[in-house]
Image (cartoon, helix red, strand yellow):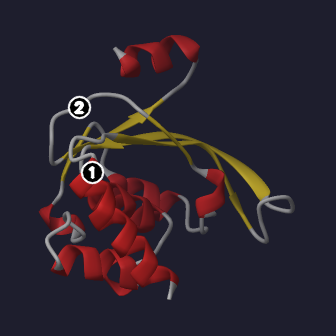
Amino acid sequence: MIHDTLVDLLTIQQDIHPGIFAVMDGTFAGDGPGPRAMRWHEKNILLASSDQVAIDAVSAKLQGFDPLSLRFIRKAHEMDLGVGDPRQIEIVGYDIENEARENPFTISLSALVVFCQQLLPQRILVSFCRSKASLNRVAD
């Protein structure tokens, strides 16, 4: 039920606000029972996209999931609400395949915070933030 609701909400959001841009803050992530009992990991990753399906797909892939096996991503992809197949997403700034191999644990979705920034449509920026100064460079 939640998967259908998420796709319905995305459809409504695109009708009302078609130009929304999303950024996911993955500087810290956690695995285990969350959000209060998670084991925290410093990941230093930011995702940014004007395609909410693509950003969820890349986030899912980073967490070790096959994005198209998640019903809400697959359904949104099939309805052309965005791109859910990571093979069709241009990723700029970092090879996420390295991340998946180096860190084989699951990141809790509740550990990611969404905030806004501007980037070209259909592209996702993946960046490492080593300090506040580098975070400011990503935001510029």
**Pair 1/2: label in front:** 1
Which percent across, then down, holds residue 114? 50, 43
Residue closer to the observer: 19 or 134: 19
The reply to whether callout 1 and callout 2 are in contact (CB within 8 Å) is no
Secondary structure found at label 2? loop
Location of mark 1 (residue): 16
Location of mark 2 (residue): 119
Which percent across, then down, holds residue 13? 32, 56
Q: Where residue 78 is drawn, which disc sits there?
A: none
Left/right placement of residue 24 relative to residue 108 reads: left
Inspect the image, locate mark 2, and give the three-letter code of the amino acid beneath it.
Leu
At x 33%, y 64%, the residue is 10
Left/right placement of residue 73 relative to residue 42 reads: left
Residue closer to the observer: 29 or 121: 121
Secondary structure found at label 1? helix
Badge 1, how many Cα within 10 Å: few under 14, some, many 20+? Answer: few
